[in-house]
Amino acid sequence: MLLDELAVYAATLGLTYPIKKGWLPKGVDAAVCIREAGGTGDELGFGVAGIQFEHPVVHVEVRGVAEDYAGPRSELEKIYQGFPKIQAQTLNSTGYYHTVIPRQSPFLAHIDEKRRPVLAVVFDVTKKPSTA
């Protein structure tokens, strides 16, 4: 589905941090997290039953080691530049994606209790419902 498809694609972008789906793990310093968030309404087809296009939102967060801004910023830049290259293509043989568009440039979301920076980008996705 959505997170699986985007995680597989993200793994092709030359990332050096592990990719996690859903949340950042507590026991790992440097990591990439791809998470679903509320999107806009789905589109139905005229004369075609069911949902034809969905518009989920994806948050990508990258956490670095304590007091290292450059490392997670570099990792997030790869995703920021890479995801918009997904245009009218099938990912992982299960999902047809029209576009994956960032809402903004990478930004510092917060610094956690261990002084690890967490940077983020939010992406708007337009895709057909996944087949598996």
Image (cartoon, grey):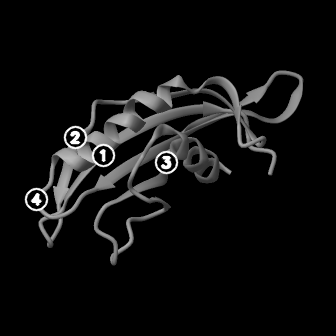
Left-right relation of 9 to 45: left
- Measured as percent of width and height from the top left, residue 4 is found at 63, 53
Q: Is residue 103 depicted above or below 71 in this figure?
A: above
* C-alpha span from label 2 to label 3: 20 Å
User: Distance from label 4 to label 3 (Cα)?
Assistant: 31 Å
Disc 3 target residue: 38
Q: Secondary structure at mark 4?
A: loop
Which picture quadrant has residue 96? top right
Q: Amino acid at mark 2?
A: Phe
Instruction: Return the x and y of residue 118 as percentages of the image width and height.
Output: 24, 55
Q: Are marks 4 and 1 in contact (CB under 8 Å)?
A: no
Q: Is residue 85 left or right of residue 2?
A: left
Q: Earlier in the sequence, mark 2 or mark 4?
A: 4
What residue is drawn where x is 54% and y is 34%? Answer: 125
- Mark 4 belongs to which amino acid? Glu
Mark 1 vs mark 3: which is more N-terminal? 3
Task: Relative to 27, say whether 55 is above or below.
Answer: above
Tell me the element at label 2: strand
Front residue of 81/127: it is 81
Please identify, in this view, whether the residue under mark 2 or under mark 3 is nearer the observer.
2
Residue depicted at 17% across the width and 66% down the height:
112
Q: Badge 1 is on which residue? A: 120
Marks 1 and 3, Cα distance to the nearest angstrom?
A: 16 Å
Q: What residue sits right under mark 4 in the picture?
A: 67
Closer to us: 129 or 117:
117
Report, in whole angstroms, how far the alpha carbon at label 2 lies from the one at label 1: 6 Å
Please give the residue where the numbered disc 2 appears in the rendered image. 107
Q: Tell me which amino acid carries mark 1.
A: Ala
